[in-house]
Image: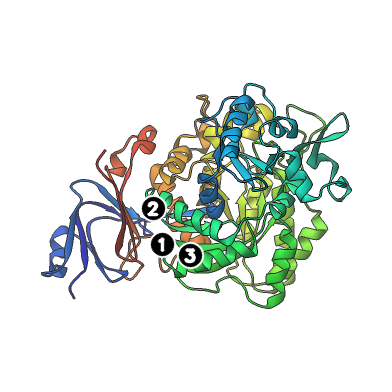
Amino acid sequence: MTADLIITGGPVITVDKNNSVHRAVALKGNKILYVGSEEGVKAFQGENTQVIRLNGRTLIPGFIESHIHTAVMGVNALAVDCRPSAVSSIEDIQEAIFERAKNTPKGEWIRGWGYNDQYLKELRNPNKWDLDKVAPDNPVMLTRVCNHISAHNSRSIEIAGITDTDAYSAETFTRQNGEISGVMLEEAHMAMFKAALLKESEIVDGMVAANEMLLKEGITSIHDSGGYGPVQMRAFQNAIEQKKFKIRLYSMIFSFAENLKFVDSYLNVGIHSGMGDEHFKLGPMKLMIDGSSSGPTAATIEPYAIDSSNYGILSHSQELVDEYIMRGQQGDWQITSHAVGDKGVTVIVNAIEKAMKEYPRENCRHRIEHCAMINDELLDRIQKLRIVPICNPIFLYEFGDGYLTNYGKERAFKMFTAKSFLDRGIIAAGASDCPITFSDPLMGIHLAVNRQTQGGNVVNPDERISPMDGLRMFTYNGAYASCEEDIKGSIEVGKLADLAILNGDFAKTAPDKIWDLKVDTTIIDGKIEYERKDD
């Protein structure tokens, strides 16, 4: 049989069960036809076969991003940039919003993204009075980098109809002199997405932007962790059918606004995880149990190191989580939840344990998104239940110094513990949670290997893993987390031809230089979807 594409002349890291390394592959259609030697691949070369010479570069499986808010990432790329790289003060934010307002019709939303109060000169969140000064005629929503806190102007609050805060827990609003300041946390923040709901066309535009960014990073599959509810699901399907989004998408059932209602709609209809095809498939039903690691609003067993009265925010009671997880287990759903603090992780582990005992089922592969702060007891229970943690070691770079301050060294050292998972045989998949932080999988691998913060601190050197184990987290383990390791995640004959070419020799790259590597080429279904231009 003649191949359509041959890639040869450099290391082919397969990430198979033996971590085999070969020198050539042949592709036919959207499948891998041959894996082996440079000499052996010549048998598959025909007159019309395209040949790519690696010349010492590395071929790897396409990266699998196991937790990303794709639509949010894309839409944020079109929003006002409020990240620390763009602004350093609330005054800078005001100027950026003022400039956007000049070209935005009155009454239309202005959205900003990525501010971090810990890096602003004022060391606080912007509030409604700050935003009213520069955009009084437009609703404004500025989302903090963690995506669990947002700042709003008076027009935004008015549109949302927030006059009575009794519907929300007291800690989800901040006040000044008894008046709502416009800074909203957790459930109040999530509720604002209903008021500021995007149009389907805006989400599709965001998907197009995200597609381009992710292909440049060698990402061929994503597990989308939800966002804009029903309109997002429709936008996903349409963008993929219209080939505006080329990357394979495994979609969690989750909405920022009214999530329990959204999850109910899927539980009640009778379908379950796995419905779809190789390009678009329903993933797990997802709950949101606690807050963010950097807010910080994560729910913890012991109080925060910086505030002995603060245990974070638990969004749902154990009883409510038990109810939904039980229904999901009974309905053959893969189950997951956002759970960051050790209290939040305990709640979801309790619920999964109870549901699996009541309704036993083989190979459930239930997940925990982030699974950030753990202890030995939780590790043992996660191992026994064969839960798949979705780990974000990349968080350690931008937020790790804050973890050491907010939670103290002992608990910070037990966050994103890739080595502890590995030592217990727990299959943990790697993810960025972009746009919370950078989507680049090579940066994620670098942080899993080095665990060094932006400030130069190493957050528990004993939790560092090898580069090969890091690569596996972002390839094979991602496929395992979506129950698709039989069709992708490694370079093996018969699997989907989803590949990435790195610009250097991965195995010979120094551990502290991994994030210097670049993706030269991204291939999906045997077709070249991205090629890097010369610098």
Residue kind at label 3, given as amino acid type: Ala
Q: Which residue is mark 3?
A: 239
Please report the residue visible at 17 percent of the width from the left and 73 percent of the height from the top.
2
- Residue 261 visible? The answer is yes
Q: Which residue is mark 2?
A: 215
Question: Residue 262: percent from the left, percent from the top?
Answer: 70, 64
Please report the residue visible at 55 percent of the width from the left and 43 percent of the height from the top.
79
Residue kind at label 1, given as amino acid type: Lys
Question: Residue 108: percent from the left, percent from the top?
Answer: 64, 48
> Which numbered disc covers residue 246?
1
Q: Residues within 10 Å of mark 3 (few under 14, many from 20)?
A: some
SS class, disc 3: helix
Q: Nearer the viewer, residue 77 or 438?
A: 77
Q: CA separation, marks 1 and 2?
A: 9 Å
Q: Which mark lies nearer to you, 1 or 3? A: 3
Please report the residue visible at 46 percent of the width from the left and 42 percent of the height from the top.
444
Q: Nearer the viewer, residue 73 or 56?
A: 73
Left or right: 33 in relation to 448: left
Q: Which mark lies nearer to you, 3 or 2? A: 3
Query: Mark 1 and 2 residues: CB-CB less than 8 Å, in contact?
Result: yes
Q: Quadrant of the C terminus?
A: top left
Q: CA separation, marks 1 and 3?
A: 9 Å
Q: Residues within 10 Å of mark 2 (few under 14, many from 20)?
A: many
- State the image quarter where residue 319 is shown: bottom right
- From the viewer's perspective, is residue 137 above or below residue 28? above
Query: Looking at this rendering, what residue extends furthest in the top direction?
Result: 121
